[in-house]
Image (cartoon, rainbow, N blue to C red):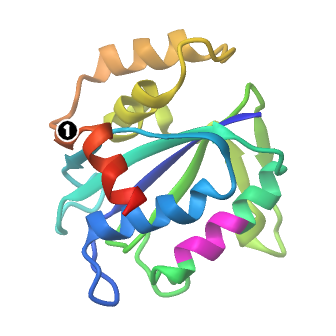
Amino acid sequence: MIVVLGLGSNKSFASLEPLEILARACQRLSSVFSQFSVSSVYRTRPMYVENQACFYNMAVCGETELSAHALLAKIHEIEAEFGRNREREIRNGERSLDIDIELYGNEEIHFVDSCDSMKNLEIPHPRIAERAFVLIPLLEVLPKSADIQKRDFLEQSLAHIGNQGAEKLLDSLEFAKLVTT
């Protein structure tokens, strides 16, 4: 199953700056995927809660045998390793690490668990079409050969909203060197 994850960080943790957090998170994620690839890293203005530092955003793509819920559990584990505490954070506020499942093959998943919000899962991400910081790296890393039916929709969405001020900070080859060191 081809999966695309979106990653973002705008807050340091344990003496690691956001770019270092993204690189280390990618190191951890690479063990979950085969055919693992990373996008460029983009600096973006925060949306929704604007009074915070800029975000560093990127995407990763790979193939996994994990179910969507098993992948979500792994993501939550990695986020916690890098200081994310969902119980203490402000919705759309600053965070050391945020990882979202943007695409899980062509599947659409709308799962809400009223007893455990950590199991809630909506794929594709419900606000994917309004976020250039998701679309730009996602389209960069998603293989052209991938059988993703939504590619045209994603490309049209990005054309409609523009880049929203996203600036490329590091290209994928430069960032990949950080991941492997």
Residue at 58%, 72% in the rendered image? 78
Kindly state the secondary structure of the residue where label 1 is placed: loop
Label 1 crowd (10 A; few <14 / some 14-19 / many >=20): some
Q: Position of residue 70 (x, y in %)?
A: 81, 60
Vertical relation: 27 (above or below) 160: below
Residue at 40%, 26% in the rendered image? 140
Dividing the picture into quadrants, the one containing residue 162 is top left
Q: 159 or 11, which lies in front?
A: 11
- Report which residue position mark 1 lands on: 166
Vertical relation: 98 (above or below) 106: below
Vertical relation: 154 (above or below) 92: above
Q: Position of residue 141 (x, y in %)?
A: 46, 30
The magenta region covers 74-79
Q: 70 or 126, which lies in front?
A: 70
Name the quarter where the N terminus is drawn.
Answer: top right
Q: Position of residue 151 (x, y in %)?
A: 55, 15
Name the quarter where the C terminus is drawn.
Answer: bottom left
User: Which residue is at the far front?
Assistant: 181
What number of labels is visible?
A: 1
Residue at 55%, 53% in the rendered image? 100
Residue 114 visible within the image: yes
Q: 170 or 94, which lies in front?
A: 170
Q: Is residue 19 magenta?
A: no
Residue at 25%, 45% in the rendered image? 174
The amino acid on which the numbered mark 1 sits, given as a three-letter code, is Ala
Q: Mostly what secondary structure, the magenta segment?
A: helix
Q: Is residue 156 left or right of residue 16?
A: right
Q: Position of residue 44 (x, y in %)?
A: 21, 48
Residue 126 visible within the image: no
